[in-house]
Image (cartoon, rainbow, N blue to C red):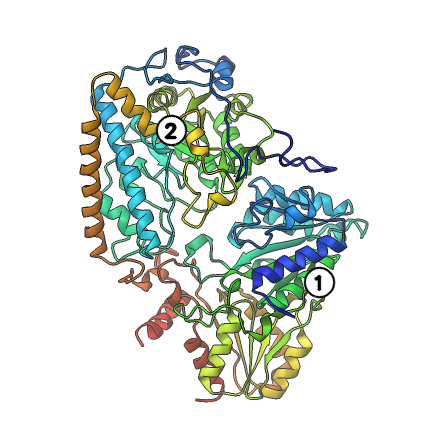
Amino acid sequence: MVNMNMVLSINSALDIMLERDNDMIVFGQDIGYFGGVFRTCDGLQEKHGKHRVFDAPLAEGGIAAMAFGMGINGLRPVFEIQFADYIFPAYDQIVNEIAKIRHRSGGEFTCPVTIRTPAGGGIKGGHHHSQSPEAQFTHTPGLKVVYCSTPYNAKGLLISAIESNDPVVFFEPKRCYRGPFYGDPHNVPTWKDHPEAEVPESYYKIPLEQARIAMRGDACTVIAWGAMVHVAEQAIRDSGVNCELIDLQTLVPWDRETVTESIKKTGRCVIVHEAPKTSGFGAEMVASIQERCFYHLECPIERVTGWDTPFPHTMEWDYMPSPARIAEAIHKTQGS
Amino acid sequence: MAGKDAADSPIHIPSTPFRPGDISTFEQWTAKPTDLSMPAIDCSAEETAEHAAGLIRVLSDDNIASGDWNRNLSAENLRLGLEHMVRLRIFDDRMMKMQRTGKLSFYMRSLGEEAVAIAQTMALENQDWIFPSYRQPGAQFVRGRDMVSMICHCIGNEEDNVKGRQMPVHYTWKDGRFISISSPVGTQFSQSVGVGLASQYKGLDEVTISWIGEGSSSQGDYHYALNFAGVFKAPVILNTVNNQWAISSHVNVATAGKNFAIRGIPYDLPSFRVDGNDFLALYSVTKWARERAAAGLGATHIEVLTYRAGAHSSSDDPSRYRPQNEAQCWPGGDPIERLKSHLIEIGEWSNEQQNSLEEKIDSEVMSAYKEAIKFGDLANGPYPSSDHIFTEVYETVPWHLEEQRKEMKRWRDA
């Protein structure tokens, strides 16, 4: 085990998989010689060769289309969209092509593509460097959707995503690349000494479909993903309530069993995401939870989310769910 | 330059000629101001084939103006152009310093490309629409925007006319017909065709100008723009600013060809390649395109050949991917130095005048900065009210946003 930040653990996953699978190719904007604007691909080109790790022209639609072609002809492309906000020129290729090729070809063609993209706010990125568009992909049959939160799960989940024969959209919370984020912009911890930053240097996998129980408790189930896992952890500590914190990790297909078991135990649930509320993935979870846990629920399920507005620049801390907002929702489930 | 990036590879990966530690050398330009004549504004696209393949210059290497494209601009106009370029460079330096002290989150300079937006906007009429990318803020100086207002946007304070919603440098200024800048690259290029057609539909004498980077020319929007502009003969001026670098990606990643200008011809657009650090050439070509568009003859495509002398942005460190000396090697030199030398050459300027101009603008920028900072900055606030998160999402605030606004206020005011 080595202490790694999330940039290094993602780099390690890519490095290991490039070593293990000669058919894997990594490309995207600025990821070749430069190693990516967030440095996640640093050194990979030099080590694995320019034909396996290279810069692509600035055209997300072209990048996704090339990956589709490579994927259906036997390669295993992993491409980076520099910011999740810039994924939309590729949306047609991802939603109509990559996601549907297995089904539309009667299973003749498959496209084992992994789409890595930094997402989420907290870096003063304004409208177009802050969005968290996971729900736009969870609504697309054929795609698996993953949202990592720590150096440890980033590496294990990314290796599983790359090995998956289904296409995976892999969101990386950019605010957490170099340290967890507890909702206080003035507190900027690193991953040093964090237990989830103890990462094996070698190959390991975290299965897709498996949630992580980040904190155990029996009074309320708090579900989050990405950077919000750490904000929720802070909120739980602040609330003094004995909560169970579930880091969902994979959104499609999500770990219904772990969530159901927890809510049957606690009877209470708070769902946290930084994406807007309306049609957010929290809405899907609320609907599914009430289908399976209705008679176990002691109170309405709470959602704490970003607002239904574009992501702001200077006032981003009034936009992102805060520990205080989450703690209040937790207290509400306790009837206080 | 085969060796450097050409690995033993089964697929072709574009090479980048120079990396850190190398000494950059550019092939020197042989193009002369007298090489290319100015065609009639009603010429066919094919008649500009040589202009697209060559390079339009008015200033020689010795900064003497000559040739068919020399419009004998008055010394007064040239001094004004020089002043705007100096203003932009000093403004950029000040904002970059402020960024380093946390007073704004991010910044992008126009270093080495100051002539582009300034000469081109000066060649337009005031009613023309400017639809920029993030490296044409200089157009605002030409149109007379108050510098305090620009700084207030960048530092995200209470007077920011973008209301704290967008990152710095994402200016919007409708009074100056300067259209809101968007981060997704290239979108403005295709949209500009619609702006131009709307003016034409309304019967107005308005032309629209837009710019895209050579990196972003890989986007579909680039090709939508050229095609729609050709199909509808739109009154637009479409500029591909080829500044050699898109963050760390060399122009070789953007195209396997050597030339962007010629791409316009198959779309039936007259197309020109122009020395982007030559103020006079840029002005002249843009004037031509403006006249053609205003006469109802359609769009023009211009490749503006220049060099991004600075970092992509305050978040970028070009020393990691290109040699430090590259900007000094650029055959087009520096746009400010060239225009200054030209003015001195014709006896209309002196180094002393240049020094006092720089001093004057330095204090102008300093006093604008001091004025702007009174309304707050990113490090210390006060910020635009976070009520602005909820307004102007729609024309009126719907019930769910009204509820969320109240919820936000409850926390903010707690």
> Is the Cβ of the residue at disc 1 closer than 8 Å to that at disc 2?
no
What secondary structure is found at the residue carrying circle 1?
helix
Q: Nearer the viewer, mark 1 or mark 2?
A: 1
Vertical order, B184 against B413 (above or below): above
| Residue bearing mark 1 | A160
- Cα distance, mark 1 to mark 2? 55 Å
What's under tag 1, amino acid-wise?
Answer: Ser
- Residue in the image at 21% along x and 38% along y: B361
- Residue in the image at 44% along x and 63% along y: A122
Query: Dividing the image into 4 quarters, which one contains the C terminus of chain A?
Result: bottom left
Vertical order, B374 against B90 (above or below): below
Task: Give residue A140's position: percent from left, percent from top.
Answer: 64, 57
Q: Is residue A36 visible?
A: yes
Q: Is residue A135 visible?
A: no
Quadrant position of residue B7: top right
What secondary structure is found at the residue carrying circle 2?
helix
Q: Judge the density around disc 2: few (<14), some (14-19), many (≥20) Cα neighbours within 10 Å.
A: some
Q: Judge the density around disc 1: few (<14), some (14-19), many (≥20) Cα neighbours within 10 Å.
A: some
Task: Give residue A92's position: percent from left, percent from top.
Answer: 61, 47
